Amino acid sequence: MNIFDIIGPIMVGPSSSHTAGAVRLGNAARSILGQQVAKAVIGLHGSFAQTGRGHGTDLALVAGLMGWPTDDLRIPQAFDYAKKAGFEYSFKNINAGDAAHPNFVRFWLTGIDGTESQVAGMSIGGGRVVISEVDGFPLEFTGDFPTILTLHEDRPGAVAEVTGILSRRGVNIAQMRLFRRNKGGLASMVLETDQPVEQADIAAVLSLPMIKTVRCINAIS
């Protein structure tokens, strides 16, 4: 933890967890989709569902989905800007289970070219967030660093091939986490890097035969 974790983010209030964290969750979901969001269904659980409107959580989530930072002064008018942009959104309350964090949200997103993605995450305080699921696959990352997400066949050498490509391209991996549903099935790598990742780096990883999808999330606002 550093001083910024203690004093919180630069933001439009009133709440670091319900407002700033919500903006960052929206930003993360937009980055994972990889393009402008045309439509969104936003599912709110726990405290987000019960008190979110009073804290501006709904406005903040929409602002994040439009790519705005936490200190954007337009956040209180996010719905108006979304309407002008033709961005369609709706909210619903969901029950993510007793084990879910109270500040939990699930996004069902459609991009401007029709691409769809489902993203789930939580705001854990001080503006910090954790993404816990992408397209039904459980994983974990914070968005504090440039991040590469892979979906790949779980087979020997997969990790070494991906990290080898990134090493040869001068991308330094700061942290790595591995997730899988079952041995020999589909798995995911979460690679946090010290520098922004270029599209050419993503293309090189995607060229590997065991790789199904690759997403890049350069640090979220």
Image (tube, grey):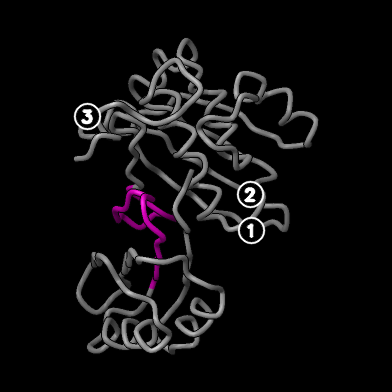
Residue 147 shown in magenta? yes
Question: CA–CA distance between discs 1 and 3?
Answer: 31 Å
Question: CA–CA distance between discs 1 and 2?
Answer: 6 Å
Question: CA–CA distance between discs 2 and 3?
Answer: 28 Å
Q: Amino acid at mark 2?
A: Thr
Vertical placement of residue 27 versus 46, above or below: below
Is residue 96 left or right of 81 when viewed as pictured? left
Q: Which residue is mark 2?
A: 110
Badge nearest the viewer, 2 or 3: 2
Residue 120 shown in magenta? no
Q: Amino acid at mark 1?
A: Thr
Quadrant for residue 178, please give it.
bottom left
Q: Which residue is mark 1?
A: 115
Q: Which residue is mark 3?
A: 98
Q: The residue tagged with tag 3: helix, strand or loop?
A: loop
Which of the marked residues, 1 or 2, is nearer the chain's N terminus?
Answer: 2
Instruction: Report the span colored magenta.
Output: 132-151
Q: Amino acid at mark 3?
A: Asp
Q: The residue tagged with tag 2: helix, strand or loop?
A: strand
Badge nearest the viewer, 1 or 3: 1
Q: Quadrant of the N terminus?
A: top left
